[in-house]
Image (cartoon, rainbow, N blue to C red):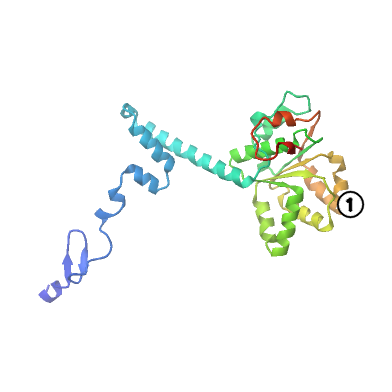
Amino acid sequence: MPAAHRAHLEWTPSRLSVGRGRPDPRPPPSQGPSSRTGPIDLLHELRLAGMAQAFEEQLAMPDIGELAFDDRLSLLLEREKTEREQRRYLRLKGLAKLHLDATIEDINFKANRGLDRSLILRLASGQWIMDGQTVLVSGATGSGKSYLACALGHQACRLGISTRYYRVSRLLDALDLARADGSYPKLVQRLARTWLLVLDDWGLASLSGQSRHDLLEVLDDRYARRGTILASQLPVEHWHDVVGDPTFGDAILDRLVNNAHRITLKGGSMRRFYDSTKETSNPTDHT
């Protein structure tokens, strides 16, 4: 190669520079960030925080070398899986905005109030949500309707199922405001995508014309596709009167009652019992 050409090309062990005194701006492979970090840093870089923590714990164990590589790797992967499930659960629980911090484990089955333990345990599996079924909970004030509804919602979050709680009146208000500011289609789509919708305090007031339409649209999007819980002081037989219109009443009740699990709570107030459990709201609101 002529000397004039050789003057323009300078070879170094790490890179080829074009033009004398003008090095390639890219760092050589040996100087990249990955080569300068240890396994724990790499795990964090890959967003595997659970594995990183478990690996640090393994390094502190004097006899960890006795475990086979496959066993150590399995422990790391199990920790990462557990950490991810816990983060997802906390995120879903925050988005659910459940009225009460209720759990299936804290439900009182001893009181004589018509609560079928086997049914609740079946519902705790979450399969009914995947099957697009509904749970209708009715009972007098203080009988534990809200607690049961929130306990099932909490269980859904544990299972990794998206959940959202609303009082019916506040849901209808939210839909009304969304229509006014142009976000109605977005809200309706978000409700349709949510796997479990918990609707509390159904039947405290009759529905207006627009409210009937809005509620029917929400329920129609969910029918046989997503799970819904409805809690009310009124027996199911009186729900038709709440709608206030025969045509809408038939349509709404058809989507609620068909393929539904009915739970009718009996007996006196359970507020004293449930007030001893952890709550996220006013303890007198167990309806």
Residue at the spot x=39%, y=46% of the render? 44
Residue at 81% across, 49% down: 252
Q: Which residue is mark 1?
A: 246
Using the image, determine if residue 34 lies above or below residue 137: below
Q: Is residue 284 above or below residue 241?
A: above
Q: Residue at x 74, y 51 (%)?
A: 170
Number of callouts in the render?
A: 1
Mark 1 lies on a secondary structure that is: helix
Q: Quadrant of the N terminus?
A: bottom left
- Name above or below for residue 220 compared with residue 227: below
Q: Is residue 21 left or right of residue 267?
A: left
Left or right of residue 150, residue 142 in this image: right
Residue at horizontal 82%, vertical 46%? Answer: 253
Q: Quadrant of the C terminus?
A: top right
Q: Position of residue 206 (x, y in %)?
A: 85, 50
Give the class, few, some or many, for how many residues have Cα within 10 Å of label 1's Cα (few <14, many ≥20).
few
Residue occupying the far left of the picture: 3
Which quadrant would residue 208 be assigned to in this image? bottom right
> Can residue 269 be seen by looking at this rendering?
yes
Question: 116 or 149: nearer the eye?
Answer: 149
In the picture as drawn, the residue positioned furthest to the bottom comes out as 4
Q: Quadrant of residue 201?
A: top right
Instruction: Name the amino acid type tagged 1.
Output: Pro
Where residue 125 sits, quadrant-wise, is top right
Residue 28 higher or lower than 108, as above or below? below
Residue 4 lies, in percent from the top left, at 12, 76
Residue 2 visible, this orientation: no
Q: Position of residue 75 (x, y in %)?
A: 41, 33
In the image shown, does 11 or 212 lie closer to the viewer?
212
